[in-house]
Image (spheres, rainbow, N blue to C red):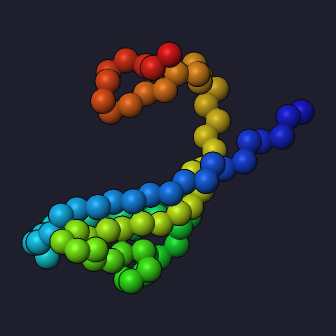
Amino acid sequence: MSEPAPDHPVTVEIRTPGPIPVTDLAALTDLAQGIADQISAGTLILGKHFRQEGDSFVFSFAGHAPAVCDEDDTGFIYTAACRGPIR
């Protein structure tokens, strides 16, 4: 019996130029928190995980990507940039 693979450490940085409309910033905040929740990074805190750098708004946080075990795993990597697998 093999041991399960540990979760992979992940660092996320989302940077957007300002100014940004408040409704768009709220939507981006919800998206960033959703990603943080998926990697168990906890609640994003203003000044720590979300800050303004010059003219940009920056979300940055770290966590662990959950290990996914798929029985049909082919060993290929799929990306949004291409339709086929990277071999």
Q: Name which residue lies at 85% across and 34% down.
A: 2
Q: Is residue 78 left or right of residue 1?
A: left
Q: Is residue 1 left or right of residue 18?
A: right
**Residue 78: where, in percent of width, then height?**
43, 27
Instruction: Specify the quadrant that holds the N terminus.
Output: top right
Q: Name which residue lies at 36% across and 68% down.
A: 59
Q: Name which residue lies at 52% across and 72% down.
A: 42
Residue 9 can be seen in this image:
yes
**Residue 25: where, in percent of width, then height?**
20, 71
Would you identify the image quadrant in which residue 82 lies?
Answer: top left
Q: Is residue 87 left or right of residue 56?
A: right
Instruction: In the displayed orientation, state which residue is furthest to the right.
Output: 1
**Residue 43: where, in percent of width, then height?**
47, 76
Instruction: In the displayed orientation, state which residue is furthest to the front.
Output: 54
Residue 23 can be seen in this image:
no
- Tell me if residue 72 comes above or below residue 12 in the rendering: above
Q: Name which residue lies at 36% across and 75% down.
A: 50
- Tell me if residue 82 comes above or below residue 23 in the rendering: above
Number of marks present in the image shown: 0
